[in-house]
Image (cartoon, helix red, strand yellow):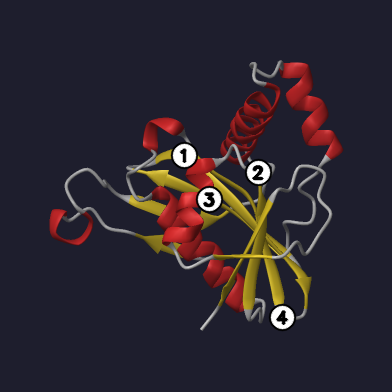
Amino acid sequence: MNIVNTGSSPAATGPATGNWTVVTEHFATADATTLRRAYYAEVAGRYWKRPATEAEIDQGLRDDPDDGLVPPTGRFVVGRRDGRPLACGGIRLLDAVTAELTRVYVDPRARGTGGGAALLAALEDEARAFGAERVRLDTRSDLVEARALYTRHGYAEIPAYNAGRYAEHWFEKPLA
């Protein structure tokens, strides 16, 4: 199990950051499922410019399953702030040296508190443990917070590496 704890000391994280702990967790646990549903509701709702229904969320999760986010080729993590599950993300191997981020989500109520940074640190550690030398991801233009997070943490925009139906931007970060 990978654990990243950002601490809660004001000197270490600033007074609004709170305490983030990120641990590997199966994507089907109750907390992980709640977060995956929230992720899908947000990305689908933004895309459709209206709230996603429960049936649409169910269908979306069936159409794009998370079963690749388990060892030996992937992992899923849940981030908790002060013990509350408020973030999640997955990593999966694309090939022997390339890992891909997916399902990166921070509850809107917890954005700006260090959860995205904690998720990325944990997921990059998981990628290194798999032997990856770089991490890639794709995202959409309307997910401006995600694109800003990736750029802030050393991800650079690259040419398309996949033909994802909703992909509009592709990023990569070398792992040192």
1 or 142: nearer the viewer: 142
Please tell me the numbered disc located at residue 85: 1
Q: Nearer the viewer, mark 3 or mark 4?
A: 3
> Which residue does the numbered mark 3 point to in the structure image?
147
> Which residue does the numbered mark 2 point to in the structure image?
140
On screen, residue 50 above or below 2: above
Whole-angstrom CA distance, mark 2 to mark 4, is 24 Å
Q: Residues within 10 Å of mark 2 (few under 14, many from 20)?
A: some
Q: Amino acid at mark 4?
A: Val
Q: Is residue 86 visible?
A: yes
Give the left or right position of residue 7, taking residue 79 as reference. left
Whole-angstrom CA distance, mark 1 to mark 2, is 25 Å
Q: Amino acid at mark 3?
A: Arg
> Which residue does the numbered mark 4 point to in the structure image?
97
Give the left or right position of residue 4, taking residue 16 as reference. right
Tell me where residue 143 sits by quadrant.
top right
Whole-angstrom CA distance, mark 3 to mark 4, is 23 Å
